[in-house]
Image (cartoon, rainbow, N blue to C red):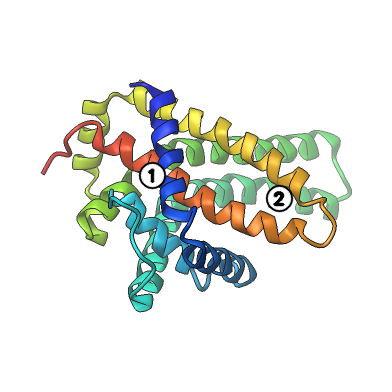
Amino acid sequence: MDYGTLISRSFEYTKDALVGKWMQWVILAVLSLVQALTLSLIPLLSGYAVRVLGGKTPAPEIDDWGRLFVDGWKMNIIMLIYMLPAILVFLVLGGIGAIGLFANEAAGGDPTAAGAAALSLLGGFLLAGLVALVMAFIALFALLRFAHTDSLGEAFNFGAILSHIGKLGWGTWIIAVIVLFIVALVYGFVVGLVSWIPFLGWLIALFLNAAFVVFYSRYLAQVYEDTPAPA
């Protein structure tokens, strides 16, 4: 897979979607602000991302606001469900460690017991992080299947999802996500610098955020479509 070409095509897609279509860009920037202020309780920007993740070309118009809201919440639900294993691991192992620390403190503070409880807390945190990382790779693909099939249930069709990743290649998929992560780091650095511009920095950052959502959604859609999806 030529990741450089994927990035280039995603950039061109984003440019065609926004440059010269200023009202569309303004609306997406506003949706970005609304989603941030509401902590994704009004996930209209995520709903638009679903359309791009679904492989629509050229970039779709911003319409059918009810559908945007519903699709945004479906994305929230999918990500939450896929992160549940990591949350449970942390609650169980981390909870045992936290309870041990409190109990030890109440009992007078045995250093050996405190160390064991701290190790349990740290182990729970690290294991939960590892589980979250693994689940994140699968969850991203699940989002793509949901976006392409327009079916929430297909986001949990584990057999089809794992089969598709296998056909694409786990290495290919992992590298694709890592490449996107690196691009996101560069983007974050640039936005961080822009944010320091007096008065206008935050506004420019909003527009850049809207553009990046279109970019990464198109990038992931191309990776997904590289190999035909199983039924």
Secondary structure beneath label 2: helix
Instruction: Report whether residue 99 is seen.
Output: yes
Name the outermost residue toward the right.
108
Q: Are marks 2 and 1 in contact (CB under 8 Å)?
A: no
Relative depth, front residue between 135 and 122 = 135
Q: Quadrant of residue 10?
A: top left
Residue type indicated by callout 1 = Arg
Quick one: label 2 or label 1, which is nearer the N terminus? 2
Percent position (x, y) of residue 119? 70, 34
What's the residue at 70%, 38% (across, down)? Answer: 189
Residue type indicated by callout 2 = Ala
Measured in 3D between alpha carbons, the distance from the residue under mark 2 to the one under mark 1, in whole angstroms, is 42 Å
Q: In the drawing, does residue 99 fall left or right of residue 169?
A: right
Secondary structure beneath label 1: helix
Q: Residues within 10 Å of mark 2 (few under 14, many from 20)?
A: some
What's the residue at 49%, 34% (across, down)? Answer: 180
Question: Residue 98 shows which numbered tag?
Answer: 2
Screen quadrant of the C terminus:
top left
What's the residue at 29%, 52% (across, down)? Answer: 54
Screen quadrant of the N terminus:
top left
Relative depth, front residue between 3 and 126 = 3
Q: Residues within 10 Å of mark 1 (few under 14, many from 20)?
A: many
What's the residue at 76%, 56% (across, down)? Answer: 201
Q: Is residue 91 above or below residue 128?
A: below
Relative depth, front residue between 140 and 23 = 23
Percent position (x, y) of residue 197? 82, 52
Residue named by callout 1: 218
Q: Is residue 71 above or below residue 112?
A: below
Question: Residue 80 shows which numbered tag?
Answer: none
Percent position (x, y) of residue 198? 85, 57
